[in-house]
Image (spheres, rainbow, N blue to C red):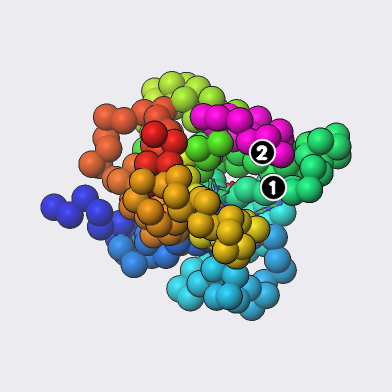
Amino acid sequence: MNELDFSGKQVLVVGGSSGIGNGIAQAFRTRGARVAVCGTRAKAADYSPDDGSYLDGLQYAQLDVSDPTAVEKFKPSFDKLDILVLAQGAVIYRRGEFQMDGFRKVMEVNLMSLMACATKFHDMLAKAKGSLIIVSSTAAYHSTMGNPSYNASKTGAMGLTRTLGEAWAEDGIRVNGIAPGLVDTKMTKVTTANPKRLEGALERIPLRRLGTPEDMAGAALFLASPLSSYIVGQTIIVDGGLIL
Ligand SMILES: NC(=O)c1ccc[n+]([C@@H]2O[C@H](COP(=O)([O-])OP(=O)(O)OC[C@H]3O[C@@H](n4cnc5c(N)ncnc54)[C@H](OP(=O)(O)O)[C@@H]3O)[C@@H](O)[C@H]2O)c1
């Protein structure tokens, strides 16, 4: 038996249009799953590999979760769901999260929408005895001085993961999470495209390299597979040792 063969499984990755979510989506696809992804843009053609978006072989649908009613209204293209990955995430730089509208916007995308998506797909996941995987961040383990909402939302995402893990275990849904360290995506270009900042960041990572979406996908495949059948409510840190 190959526990990492996802043939016949339906996967949805919210925030799968680029970066980490996209890497996770492609990893499931190459292991046999049918994979749908969502992002903010109107259509797949609006994305380019330059932004870390590889949509070949994935089914794309627009879903902007900053609108609190959008998840409710969303009509999925499938009627069974085995694995739901919630990788949507936003950050506002230049102290924008110290303004209440910025703080609320990031909360809505990074935390409120997790609950909206999780509850929307609860019944499908229960029917499939499926898995829910929530992408939080190592920011849940320490302060991030310029980004209060990002920090609070990611800490909340970790709390939500363990609570839904406990609550939904009896429904047959395994809920777990991934806390990435510093991964090279469009979200982190502010650090990675600045040679001085990049050098400083690499010095703090014991593995001396940035994480890749594929590194994150390894943990997601594991958490969705029978290899992790007795793991519930945990958030696995995948950070090259950054917060050690
Ligand atoms: N990169 C890192 O170092 C790092 C570290 C820790 C945690 N994370 C987390 O990992 C997740 C993925 O981030 P990433 O680094 O891969 O960045 P990314 O490439 O910018 O991906 C973010 C994803 O979230 C989607 N998204 C953003 N706002 C949305 C909204 N309002 N509605 C629906 N989808 C929305 C994006 O859609 P579009 O493509 O349409 O913008 C994209 O698919 C996020 O939760 C992030 O917080 C990242």
Q: Bounds of the magenta span?
A: 140-155
First reached walking from the N terminus: tag 1 or tag 2: 1
The type of residue carrying mark 2 is Tyr
State yes or no: Cβ of the residue under disc 2 lies below 8 Å from any atom of ligand 1: yes
The type of residue carrying mark 1 is Val
State yes or no: Cβ of the residue under disc 1 lies below 8 Å from any atom of ligand 1: yes
What is the chief secondary structure element of the magenta stretch? helix
Q: Height in image: 113 above or below 188?
A: above
Q: Which residue is mark 1?
A: 91
| Residue 61 in the image, given as x and y percentages of width and height | 62, 63
Q: Which residue is mark 2?
A: 150
Would residue 112 be found to the left or right of residue 21 on screen? right
Instruction: For residue 215, say whether it is visible.
Output: yes
Q: Residue at x 39, y 23 (%)?
A: 170
Would residue 186 be found to the left or right of residue 181 on screen? right
* Number of other residues with Cα within 10 Å of mark 2, as a class: few under 14, some 14 to 19, many 20 or more: many
Would residue 180 be found to the left or right of residue 3 on screen? right
Q: Nearer the viewer, residue 124 or 235?
A: 235
Q: Label 2 near label 1: C-beta < 8 Å?
A: yes
Q: Quadrant of the C terminus?
A: top left
Q: Residue at x 54, y 58 (%)?
A: 198
Q: Height in image: 59 above or below 212?
A: below
Total count of labels: 2
CA distance for labels 1 and 2: 6 Å
Q: Height in image: 209 above or below 96?
A: below
Q: Residue at x 43, y 41 (%)?
A: 242
Secondary-structure class at tag 1: loop
| Residue 99 in the image, given as x and y percentages of width and height | 86, 37
Judge whether residue 163 is colored magenta: no
Judge whether residue 147 is colored magenta: yes
Q: Height in image: 40 above or below 143?
A: below
